[in-house]
Amino acid sequence: MIERAKKKNIPPYQWTAIDVKTRMRFLAYSYEKTFINGLIFMIFIIIFLRAMGIRGKITFQTDNGEEFGGKSPSKLDWLNKYIFNPLGAELIHIPKGKKEWNAYVERSHQTDDNEFYIPQLELCESVEEFLWRALRWEFMYNTRRYHSTIRTTPYEKLRKEMVVGKYIAMFPVFILEKISTMYELFFHNPSSKGGEDVLTKDLFSIPVGFFLIYYFLNFLLYSKFLRNNINYNFNWLTHINTICDSKMENMFL
């Protein structure tokens, strides 16, 4: 299975965000586990949730990996002050030695292995097909798969908390490098030591860049450019309010 994924150039890293209360999940993929990809993933989630009408504070709880800011408290404080707080969000890290705090995500990864990768990966003939199957899996997980702990599906659990359409269960599953490489193209500093991207080495390069990319991503989310470059067509997302739930479900049967 792993060899086939490599042969088809399917990205090896899965990024997962899960809402603890409802178990709603959002997925993305990448070829590298980097700081820039982690930030792009979280910012895209913020954009998506705001577009879906979520107005409350968004809190990300992650491990202490470098892709989420690392172990430096000052770096975490800086990211919150200049990146997340202005967007109505917050990033917090799991305390050291408390890996069980990340149990929801880890348990969902076991479900991914058993119900998605094992039966589906061998069927994928291209990256494009893989992303479409991953989107379908995300939608099924959120809207049709019963969770014994919450005694319903994530979407139905969310509906008990607020009025929201089923399109919130379809976060665009894409390859993070499709966005992060564009950022690096514009904010690369060739004079930095070793030719490193300033973004990953100098926190003070982040504010202007990320606020530009935040609004840029808002534009891309519903643009022709994104539909042509995220590797699958989700034109239906821009017209989702006109599509009834039954038709949406039929798309993924």
Image (tube, rainbow, N blue to C red):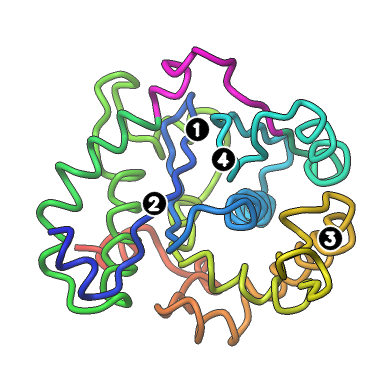
Q: CA distance from mark 2 to mark 3?
A: 25 Å
> Which residue is labeled 4 in the image?
163
- Asked whether the beta carbons under mark 2 and mark 4 sit within 8 Å of each other, the answer is no
Give neighbour class at mark 3: few <14, some 14-19, many 20+ (Cα, 10 Å): some
Tell me where residue 183 appears, x and y as whole percent: 71, 71
For mark 3, give the secondary structure. helix
Q: Quadrant of residue 16?
A: top left
Give neighbour class at mark 4: few <14, some 14-19, many 20+ (Cα, 10 Å): few
> Which residue is labeled 1 in the image?
19
Q: Which numbered mark, 2 or 1, is in the foreground of this view?
A: 2
Q: Is residue 20 left or right of residue 221?
A: left
Q: Amino acid at mark 1?
A: Asp
Q: Residue at the spot x=71%, y=55% of the render? A: 200
Q: Which numbered mark, 3 or 1, is in the foreground of this view?
A: 3
Please say if 80 is above or below 129: above
> Which residue is labeled 2 in the image?
14
Q: CA distance from mark 2 to mark 1?
A: 16 Å
| First in residue order: circle 2 vs circle 4 | 2
| First in residue order: circle 2 vs circle 1 | 2
Q: Nearer the viewer, residue 217 or 253?
A: 217
Which residue extends farthest top?
97
Look at the image and say whether residue 103 sits in the magenta stretch. Answer: yes
Q: Is residue 23 left or right of residue 7?
A: right
